[in-house]
Amino acid sequence: MRVESKLKSEISLLAIGAAFALSATPALAQESADDEAVEDANTIVVTGRLRGDESVQDIPLAVTVISTEQLGAQGALNIEDIETLAPNVVIDPVGAGPGGGAISIRGVSFQDIEKSFEPTVGVVIDGVFIGTNTGQLTNAFDFEQVEVLRGPQGTLFGRNTIGGVINIRRSRPTKEVGLKAEATLGNYGRQEFNAVLNIGDGDVFGLKVWGYDRSFDGYYDNVTLGVDAGANSNTNLGATLLLEPSPELEVLLTFEHTKLGGDPPVSSVSDGTDLICILLGAVIPEQCNRNLGDDLYTVFGNFLGDIDYSEEAYSAQINYDIGDLTLTSISALRDSDERQTQDFDGTSIPFFQTDRTQFYRQLSQELRLAGDFTDSLSGVVGLYYFENEYQLDSTTVLPSGASSSNGTDHETKSYAIFADFDLSLTEQLRLSVGGRYSKDEKAYRRFVLGGIDLSNEDDWSQFTPRVSLDYAVNDDLLVYASYAGGYRSGGFNGRGITSTSVQTSFEPETVDSFEAGAKVTFLGGDGIFNVAAFYSKYNDKQEEVVQATPPGSPNPQETVTRNAASATIKGLEADLRMQLLDGFTITSSIGLLDASYDDFFIDLNLDGAQDPGEDASSRELRRTPDVTFSVAADYRVPIGNSSELALNTRFSTTSSYQTTIVPAPGQFGVNDPRGIHPSLADLSAAATFKFDMSDTSSAYVRVFGRNLLDERGVGGTLPVAGLFTFSSGVPPRQYGVTLGVEF
């Protein structure tokens, strides 16, 4: 099953700019250069239901739209920065994988970077689904719009979207000569340079070329080596060719290259319950029993570690209009190589160090027909194919100095057919129904201690339905109720070290979600208020559990994935936007969440029965804060005839939540308290002065600050099998200045 890394430029066809629906929160209407004009300048236009342009106020879905201005105003680095702009969304970085993210929407989350496991929230970039957590936290440069679709999206987006979808739409070629360029300097050595160049004939041909380069020294202080730690770099280069040879046909061809680098630090939070402190606490007393605040930013690793990630991506998109219908095809190939070395124990002594080399390749193809089938029936039908393969070679250096190596070889093939329709029952009442049938096939080999070669293969199929009923009470009020199902594929234990765990598959997990909501427009279109309540049943939930190994195994225990739990998650979300005066807009969102396990059985002794001490249902689900809240104000005032001053401020807070599922020492039913992400207040602000240099060109300068209160605490924690525990810290205060020009 091992294959050579290869890139093929044989991606023909395909197409689309199909994002998805969204709901109020920030963002005034954004249009790409060739979008049709929107009659009401306050209308937020979305395309996420794949039926063409729709107003977010006219669709029965809970969605948040985030514009490029909002991200730029807070000096955004990557999609992690959208979490404070959408309700019930949590995004934490995962330092164990380049660009890895732990994304939670409505309490459904996942954080592992092993590519044999799959995400619960889909990240889609220009219509292409990213099949692994690694590389999900892409930079925010050249975004046109980000759409956060909340709740299961199994009908239109398929497997591994049971929490929701984050759809990123980048700018399209304008077919005219133009340039936008920016330079940003900030604290912690931040240097960022980017540019987008457009050329074209104004009619048939357009070419967009872009480049992005960022470096950052990091905000950790490694006192063992006497250097800053946590550095990262990101280089992204690419081009998109747009061809429109006729009014009916559109072709988009894109190539991009991404390179990530830096060092991945961890902060030691081991204490007297961890083996490293029990055995070696007298040698490293200052590195044990530390606080979970300012101490996190002083680290002790005996080597920095290194990130070396390179990816090349190709996509071809084709849209062809056939009367009131559009035939769309999207083909994409993504190919990445990565190597990451890391000192996981976070101390100044060699205790647990890893060297992981991986190759990953995914190929996807989507074909769909969408539009108005009759005067009263509209919708979309389609076919989807996805495959990926990856190889992992991992070496771990143990406390004794000995090393152990293992490897993984994994392949996935997935097929789907889907349909989603709207039927107008009356002028005000609409019924929407949809469904998707998916089949996944996986094959797996695992090379473990002693050169043992183990393998497994399995397949699963699932039908995910959706139905909703909405009623337009009048032009300013839409009410709806819906049901949606979603699932996350089954798979294999990517860390298995015994034949039992490797040859035992885990089954898909599913979510059944019920939602009711209302969308209100007021102040003559200058205000919107959207609210949604939801109730979700989480079944056969996949959880990582530590259990005993069979007699004769090289280790007494191992971490495996099991369908060990079920849960109930319910909540309420509200979005508000008001344009109170010309140029003055207030936006706000709040999310309330109530999540708990119904059952969570960990078979510690592998006897197949739930014995005393094996009930973990009293633990907290990860990344399920009770409250997420944000409020932002944007004020734009003209200065003379050729200048504008924009002032933006945002306050957000999230109640405390757990980042680890591992139990507290000696308390099986309680999460380790070192995993609590505290409730922090986040105040950010920016001021942008923009002035015209001519009728067709302008320049701007922006001063920005993030986390101005310099709140600090745990970003994420992982206790490792009683050996040691490490954490990361939330980003401290950051500030900088951006200079930009465009014409």
Image (cartoon, helix red, strand yellow):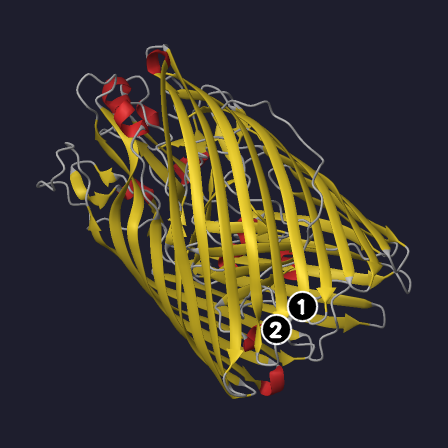
Q: Which one is in front, 64 or 475?
A: 475
The answer to whether residue 237 is left or right of residue 389 is right
Instruction: Residue 669: give x, y in percent of width and height.
Output: 18, 45
Residue type of the residue flagged with mark 1: Leu
Does residue 70 lie above or below 560 as drawn?
below
Does residue 385 lie above or below 326 as drawn?
above
The residue under the point 52% across, 30% down is: 229
Q: Secondary structure at mark 2?
A: loop
Q: Earlier in the sequence, mark 1 or mark 2?
A: 1
The answer to whether residue 628 is left or right of residue 581 is left
Answer few, some or many: residues within 10 Å of disc 1's Cα (few below 14, many 20 plus, some between 14 and 19): some
The answer to whether residue 683 is left or right of residue 12 is left
Label 1–label 2 contact, CB within 8 A: yes
- Taking the view exactly as shown, the residue that stands out farthest to the left is 612
Q: Based on the displayed image, in which of its 4 quarters is residue 89 positioned? A: bottom left
The answer to whether residue 526 is left or right of residue 625 is right
Residue for badge 2 = 373
Answer few, some or many: residues within 10 Å of disc 2's Cα (few below 14, many 20 plus, some between 14 and 19): some
Quadrant where the C terminus lies?
Answer: bottom right
The residue under the point 70% across, 70% down is: 636
Residue 711 visible? The answer is no
Instruction: Residue 269: give x, y in percent of width and height.
Output: 34, 33
Residue type of the residue flagged with mark 2: Phe
Residue 315 visible? The answer is yes
Residue for badge 1 = 325
Q: Secondary structure at mark 1?
A: strand
